[in-house]
Structures are given as structure tokens and as C-alpha cells.
Amino acid sequence: MPAPCGPYALLIPAYFVSRRKPVSFSKHRLYYTVCPEPSVTLANSGNAVSDTLAKRKVRGAFFTPPQMTEFIVDWAVRSGEDSVLEPSCGEAAFLVTAATRLAALKADGLPGAKQIVGVDVHADSANQATRVMQDAGFQSEISVSDFFDVEPEARFDAVVGNPPYVRYQDFAGDNRVKGLEAALTQGVRLSGLTSSWAPFVVHASRFLKPTGRLGLVLPAELLTVNYAAEVRRFLLKRFRSVKLVMFEARVFPEVLEDVVLLLAEGEGPAPHFEVSQAYDLSSLADVEKGDWTWFAPDKGAKWTSALLSTESVKQYNSVSTGDGFTTLLDWGQTSLGSVTGNNKYFTLTQAEVKEWGIHANELRRISPPGSRHLRGLSFSETSWKELGSNGARCYLFAPSIDRELSEGAASYIAHGLNLKVEHAYKCRNRKPWWKVPIKKAPDILLTYMDHVRPRMTTNLAGVAYLNSLYGIELKADYRKVGMDLLPLAAINSLTLLGAEMVGRAYGGGLLKLEPTEADKLPLPSPDVLLAFASELRALRPQVNKALGLGKLFDAVKLIDRVLLVSACGLVQKEINSLRESREVLFGRRESRSRVANVSD
């Protein structure tokens, strides 16, 4: 076998190139290599066209590693007479693998064209797929079409592939309308935040025979995002068996999203779904022989809990819904900070303010962009001044449209025009472009994307904030106790686990909370904080010291003794269960972080 030329080399059986059948083909696979990365030159009516990674990203197309295509196809194709559809076929990675599988399962001969069907909206990719299949010695039917325009015909034994992944911001126009309508025909009503893969999954299922099999590569947000709840419900209703394969390591280095493999078959409904975990692509061969954990989710609930034991989930649910805990939404309102459109221009240092001569009433004090400076339990006036003295961008350019501009502000706006800032994201939709909408200074600042945990910091400095942070405006009745104790009390084992449960993992191991997810974060209730206020305040110096030394777990143990033992009555075994569950989910993210650092 020749040396592969990249992780996404397309492996095609040598037999179908040389036309000579090897001995015992079903046991021995011989390959030659086609290298589509980093760009592919395609023939298009006699003209060479370069299909680059950037172009494929726009349409949500990513080449699938051969180990992944082979695993899915081996599961989905079970007879030499099966018919297979790849609805977004790209350069035929799944089709070639499927044809190879069909040929190996047939008693004699090769699969017919109607057994191997592909569709792709990109004409150059479809043409290349046809040539690849021909060069490999296979017949196939490959057409150029938007998959949502293809009339469903429930004739296929297997539908396999890697659907295009286009986020909702770019999944627009006719494509979006057709996708949402296709899903609605199956009773699946998708929201305006839907990415392209979701309606694709629903539509693809309509091409299957009642007993057919659906094998797809999907973003791991299937498990977690709210808009995918309808897709999750659909899968359990449509199929008799729903299985998911998850990866600890990142398997698509060029994208941030993690992926799962969906293996669904038969006529539903399914009482539960099953999960198996693989470390990386090399571990796929052991998945079928390994353990599968089943999980029966509540209606509309995320599927993240499937990674934990049933007892651990029961323990978490019992404590988080008990009298001692509530949610962040019950404490107050969470919102994203101001979006400037160009932080480098709109945020200024003390030196820049002085240089331009901008007046104090044309500025707004802010927490500097980012969140690295928010490591403690509070952000004080002293801390803010110290950052400013050290050159941090502690000011937001915020002149009033109702007041005459100072000479310095007018000059700075002219400077922005020279830099073409008015054409930047958000700026071009504002009138005037330099007037940034400013949110009210929050009571608590909250990080929403972090490697370890969401961090709460009391905003003692009373500064405004940008979109690198969420701000929490506490309810009036809870404001005093919340500002005093909530960031401290949030450092407990249940809240740490809750962050992993309600949030989502991003590439590189980051944990992200969307605003609606942050609302669900479990936190000690106001009544508990009031009842144990003196005990918690007494721990503040020790907790601050532990955090300063980077010893989070030492701080957690201190808070757990008050909130989980004294307030909630948990025993050490139950607390250990919460901690171990958090480590399972955190460990998955951490392993992806290590892989990302190595690949970078």
C-alpha cells in the first residue's frame, strides 16, 4: 500500500483500478491512494477548476477520513444486493467504500449502477465522483442537485455520508426554506437557529426502506443544542435502534466542532439510544465489540447524560432539583456584553485617551476585552485601575449623539473612517456607525467560554462589559446576597458538573455556555446562601488563596463541606459520584485540548 499523502486520502481498492481480482478479496483489501487535500483540481467542461478547503468550508463540505467511511459502510451495508445512497457525495469517499463492500459481499460480479447512487449540489465534485467511480471500475448513478430538491423514494437499504455543515448564519435563502420545509413534512419543526445538517438528517431518512439503515457523520451538537431537540425526538420515533459513536480526540482538525457517528436502523420507535466511545479513528475497529451504554432521555432533554452512569445522573438530578439548589435564571437575567464590531478601534488605553484628547464624558469604563483578568471572586476599582496603569484597554469610545463632539473625539472618528471601521461587522448597520450600544453595568460578570469552568466575578468596579463576557443582573431581592456570595458559592462540585451537563464542548477542549444554557446552570439557592452566609464568608480568604495558586479542587472541597454536606445532607460517597461524573465530561474535553495542541 503506498504511503498516504494526508489524513483524508481517499483509499480505493487496487482491484478496481487494475481490473485484476486478488485471491480471497473478502479477506484482503489492496489500495491505491487519491489525495484530495489541500486542494483538488477538477475537470469542468474541459477547464481546470481548483476546489480549495476555503471553498468547501463555505458549502460545509469536509473530506471524511477513510477509517470513518469504512466503519459506517461496514455497519450499513450487509448484503451484496443492498442499494446505497450518499446524499452529499463529494468526491465519492462513501460511494467507493460502499461499492467495495458490495463487491466483497456478492457471490460474483460487481454491484449495478442502481445500487450505488450519489447526489451533490456542487457540479465539479459530482463530476469528480463519477470519474473516481469509473476509474475504480464501478457503475453508479451520480446526479447534480440540491438534495432538498430530490423527491424522496423509500427504496434504499442504506443511506450513508457526511452531511454539509453550514451554520444558521450562512444557511439562508432558498436553501434554508427548502430544508425547513423538508423537515416539516416529517413533523419536525426546526427553529431559526438551525444549521444545515439538521433538516438533512430528517430528509435523508425518507429515502430508506422501513427496515433501512442510516449511517451519518454529524456534529456533536446533536447531543446538546436546543434546536436539535426536534431531531433527537425524530430519531427515536422513526428508528427501532439509534446508536451513537463518540470520540475523545478531535478527528476533523480543520474544524472546531466535534463529531459523532449516527447509526440508526429499522422502524421505530426506539425506547432509548445507545452510546459507545472511541478514543480516535484507530479505535473504531473495537467499537462493535465493546460496551454500549443505553440511555432513555426525558422529552426534549439533551443527550449529554449518556456519557455518565445511570446512578450518577440520578444523583445529579436529585440534588440539582432539590431545595438547596436552583438555576441561574432564578437568580437573575443573563445577557451578552456589547458588540463593538472592532475592539481594537473602540477600546482604548489610558495612553491613547490622552494622545487623542478624548473627554471623560465621551468614554465608558469597561472590563477590558477578554477574561484573563477575571481570576478572583471580585473585580474591584483597584483592580481596574491597576489594569489601566499597565496598558489594558479599560475604556470604550462612547460619545453621545446628543452632545457636541470634542475636537479629540471628532479626530478619532475621522481616524476610524480612514481605517474603514464603518464597514466592519455591526458598524455598517449602526447609525451613526461609531455609536456602540452599551449594556447596563452588571452585578456579576460571567465567562462563557473556558477550558476549566465558567467563572463568576462580582463587578465591584461597576464597569460595562463587552461580548467576551456575559453579565448577570440579579433580581432585586437577591442582589445583596448574590453579589456577596454567589461567585464563591458557585465553586462547588454540583455546579461544576452542571456546567458540563448544560454547556457544550468546542474544538480544542473549550466549554461554552450559550445564554439559554447559562440560564440552566445549577446554583445554590438564595435561601441556602442566607442560611450559611457566615460559614461561606469565613472561607473566602482560603478560597481566594487556593484560586490564586491554581488549586481549584482545594477551593471546591471547602465549599462542598458547607453547601453539599451541611446544607444538602450529602455523604462523601455521593459527593465523590458528582466529582467523578464531572471528571468524565471534563476529561473528554481535556483530551481534545491535548490533541489540538499537538496538531497545532
Image (cartoon, helix red, strand yellow):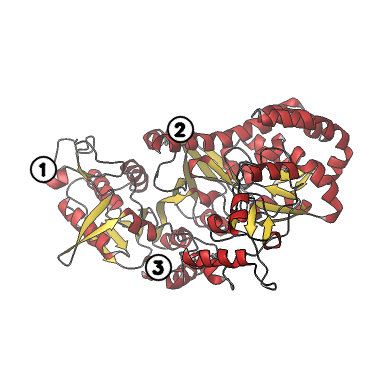
Q: How far is mark 1 from mark 2, CA to CA?
A: 36 Å
Q: Tell me the residue at 38%/60% (across/down).
A: 58
Q: Whole-percent x and y of residue 401? A: 66, 72
Q: In terms of secondary structure, where does tag 1 sit?
A: loop
Label 1 neighbourhood size at 10 Å, few (<14), some (14-19), many (20+)? few
Q: Is any part of residue 380 visible from this angle?
A: no
In this picture, residue 332 sits left or right of residue 130: right
Element class at badge 2: loop
Answer with the quarter of the image where residue 157 lies: bottom left
Check disc 3 and report the residue beneath it: 148
- Element marked by disc 3: helix
Q: What is the CA distance from the residue labelled 2 to the residue labelled 3?
A: 36 Å
Q: In the rendered view, would you say 320 is above or below 462?
A: above
Distance in Å between CA atoms under marks 3 and 1: 39 Å
State which tag comes first along the sequence, 1 or 2.
Answer: 1
Q: What residue type is disc 3 on?
A: Phe
When the figure is inspected, residue 396 is found, relative to residue 187, above or below; the finding is: above
- In this view of the protein, which residue sits in the foreground, 212 or 164? 164
Residue 290: mark: 2
Name the amino acid, label 1.
Answer: Arg
Q: What residue is pinned by disc 1?
A: 20
